Amino acid sequence: MSQDETSGRVLLFTGDGKGKTTAAVGMGLRACGHGMRVLMLQFIKATPTGEISAARQLPSFEIVQTGRGFVPPPGHPQFEEHRRAAAAGVEQAAQAVTSGRYDLVILDEVCTAVSLSLLDEKRVAELAAKRPLAVTLVLTGRGATPGLMALADTVTEMRCLKHAYDSGRRAQKGVEF
């Protein structure tokens, strides 16, 4: 095998369409199937989701929610709590990436955290740059900045052409969460 086949990559899933987290979870599942160890840190989410329940059944797939839920606008009394949670999450991610414990690290909604000013793009870029070559890093979330897209090896934009929300349908268990 060449180094290119064994070196980790940086992938980024962004856009206003559905499927960013789902794609990352799929990658995690695929990695587990190859005996790899996976950590997903969720930067915004703070409620039980189907992916957390499923991952509990896979000893090599760990999901940790570092977020506090829906983010209020800057200036709101709780905004700083969300910012502190995101900062703690990125520090946890930095430790995980260099720990040697994981082959694939997913930073779910980290692009959203940057676009909402919870995290500095530079801090996420530093984390990506310091990862060992064997570790694959996946970044997800709406509003990926040009800087985050530039550091990724692969960028996929999910575009919403039609969504059930638009016709008034609520989020469905097993589909949206």
Image (cartoon, rainbow, N blue to C red):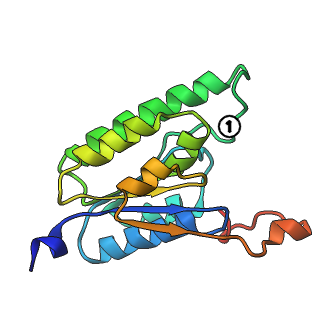
Q: Measured from the top left, where is residue 53 in percent x and y?
A: 52, 61
Depth order, front residue of 27/12: 12
Counting every numbered tag in the picture gives 1
Dot 1: element: loop
The N terminus - image quarter: bottom left
Amino acid type, label 1: Val
Q: Say which residue appears at 59% left-offset and 42% top-offset.
A: 115
Left or right of 6, for residue 91: right
Which part of the image, by quadrant, shows the C terminus? bottom right
Who is closer to the viewer here, 23 or 160?
Answer: 160
Residue in the image at 36% along x and 54% along y = 151
Q: Residue at x 21, y 44 (%)?
A: 98
Query: Above or below — where is 45 with respect to 106?
Result: above
- Residue of label 1: 71
Q: Residue 114: image x %, image y %?
A: 53, 41
Nearer to the camera, 129 or 58 = 129
Q: Quadrant of residue 94?
A: top left
Q: Is residue 3 visible?
A: yes
Above or below, 71 against 134 in this view is above
Q: Is residue 41 positioned above or below 9 on the image?
A: above
Q: Is residue 41 visible?
A: no
Q: Is residue 30 left or right of residue 112?
A: left
Mark 1 Cα within 10 Å, few/some/many (few <14, many 20+)? Answer: many
Residue 78 spot, x, y in % from top left: 68, 24
Residue 95: give x, y in percent of width and height.
27, 39
Going by the image, does 33 lie left or right of 88? left
Task: Give the residue at the far bottom of this rendering.
Answer: 1
Quadrant housing residue 15: bottom right
Residue at figure coordinates x 25%, y 67% from the top left: 36
